[in-house]
Amino acid sequence: MPSFKHSAAPYISVVVGARNDDHGGNMLRRMQAFVNSWIAQSKRFGLESEIVIVEWNPPEQRPRLMDALKWPADSAPCEVRFVEVAPEVHRRFDNSDTIPLHQMIAKNVGIRRARGQFVIAMNLDIVCSAELMQFLAERRLEPGKIYRIDRHDVASEIPAHSSVDELLAFCNSHLLQVFTAEGLSGIAPDGLRNLEPHDVAAPATGLRLGAGWYELESFQGEHYRWIAPEADIVCQKPAGTFRLAMDIETGPSAGADPVTVEIADTAGHLLAAESVQGRCKLLLYVPEHSGSGMLRLRGKGAGIPITRDARMLNLRVFSLRWEHVPEASWPYPHHGTDIRLSLSESRQVKIAVSQGSSPKLESMEVRLGDSAPVVMSALPHRNEVELGPATSAMEIKLTFGAGADPEASADDAGQPASWFLEAIRTGQSTDWSATCVATSPFASFMRHPAYLHTIAAGDFTMLSRDDWFHLRGYPEFTTWPMHIDALFCYAAYHGGLREVVLREPMRIFHIQHLSGAGWTPEGEQARNARVRSKGVSQMPFSELVQWIDVMRRFNAPFIFRGESWGLGDVTLPETSVAARR
């Protein structure tokens, strides 16, 4: 094991605010897991770091956290420091009798006194994965960026007196749910995300949802999910010729423009694309030889900001399902100059037409109507054909332009695309202007609007120390600390920082605790009731969105504190674990 000396300026500072009041139940055990795992992995990966614990308003009848927790004989290369905010300092703040710990102000106290090049604002019950700790030790972080990550909740029954490897193995095998930029998803035993009742896909279909899907919503009896710019579909394809049918609709952020829907593989290679507008049925014809795997659904729209929602809502999905395709009705049933199509519904047909050596797709609208069957002998573009209701097939004979070799063209056209995406318009666009997701009237003035990963931001937000100082830390509201972490993220973004979301296999694990302590979905009602009983206000989500809307309009941050942020004008007692030995 290499030996380390504490550097004058560690690379990473981790800041938490806490008091020994058993907040959330079993607090000391959860906090012990946090400090043990960080110190052990700092030693393993050679990460020069420090833990800064701001002990806010310590209860008189309980021991200090430094005495209540166990510490290794040598924590190098991680130093552990304590900063104490005494009860008389706490009483200077509003609501001091009902809020014993002003969490975000406590974090500001630690951030201001941190010595690391980069500072992570974290909570006391977080365990970082080995992959994340190794990444931090590689010293590849950059100033001018705000680093965020998904939060994975794990069962509270963490093994006592376990090694860091046993703790990480427990966390990875006892996942309950994950908080992503798009919201909360339960995690199934196979590691994939749970589908909810009335979800856009049913488990029996072999279709599951990966990253990029917002939480399930419903309106007027219909259930749907909005998607981020990219959303993953986990596919288990049935044997035979099948197509993936998607009931979709373009959203308010698309405006009056169509949305380009793309299907790609996980490497980003484009498989198929189509332009859609309004309510549509999308049909993705999947090659028979294709196996199970992951598909990436992309919705490229205008991305117009919304007044009452921070998201950009370009596309929503009502359902995903497999449909068997009779071989005769495959989009490329025959190849050459004679093509016969079987039709059972109105649809847009695309046919590969080759002019010389350059194949291209030509479109033709085919509608079932009252007219007699027809046979076309022309290029299919710029034509609209109506077929009688009893008609089940039509024939098209392609002719080619001057100079083209018909036989060569037939060979070229005989190489169909492996994937094919077809759109059938099924309804008009919703008038979003009268809904709660109407676009912002100031959208044209917003130069760089973005939707950020702010869910569970209080558990992991990392910036350079200089950037924390430029932004003067979190807003120091003395209300219940809801949405303050999200407000800071948008201030950082509009202050010129770029968001970087650290991806799998990097993870943070949050050890589950009692409902009503902090924010968990199952404890939200209990927490709200507790806050109301105390007579304390909290920032509603609608107010957060108003702040975001103003920052987007002016592309400038809100800075809520002066130079004395983080109790910078107060001398606070400090000590370290090493100094107490």
Image (cartoon, rainbow, N blue to C red):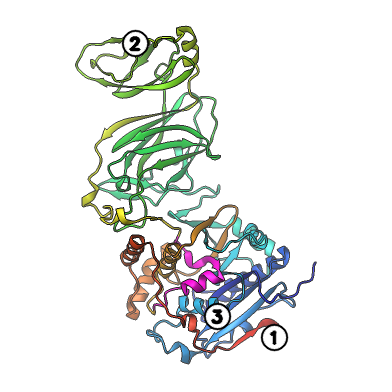
Identify the disc placed on residue 579: 1
**Image quadrant in which the N terminus is located:** bottom right
State how far apart marks 3 and 2 are (Cα): 78 Å
Residue 550 appears in view: yes
Q: Earlier in the sequence, mark 1 or mark 2?
A: 2
State how far apart marks 1 and 3 are (Cα): 17 Å
User: Which residue type does callout 3 highlight?
Assistant: Val
In this view, the residue in front, 407 or 107, is 407
Q: Earlier in the sequence, mark 3 or mark 2?
A: 3
Identify the disc placed on residue 485: none
**Image quadrant in which the C terminus is located:** bottom right
Whether residue 555 sits left or right of residue 411 in the image: it is left
Identify which residue is drawn at 47% across, 63% down.
Answer: 456
- Reading the image, the residue beneath label 3 is 54
In this view, the residue in front, 375 or 113, is 113
User: Which residue type does callout 2 highlight?
Assistant: Glu
Q: Height in image: 10 above or below 430? A: below
Residue 122 appears in view: no
Identify which residue is drawn at 45% across, 79% down.
Answer: 102
**Range shown magenta:** 454-477
Residue lying furthest left? 370
Q: Earlier in the sequence, mark 1 or mark 3?
A: 3
Q: Height in image: 562 above or below 119? A: below
- Reading the image, the residue beneath label 2 is 395
Q: Height in image: 196 above or below 463? A: above
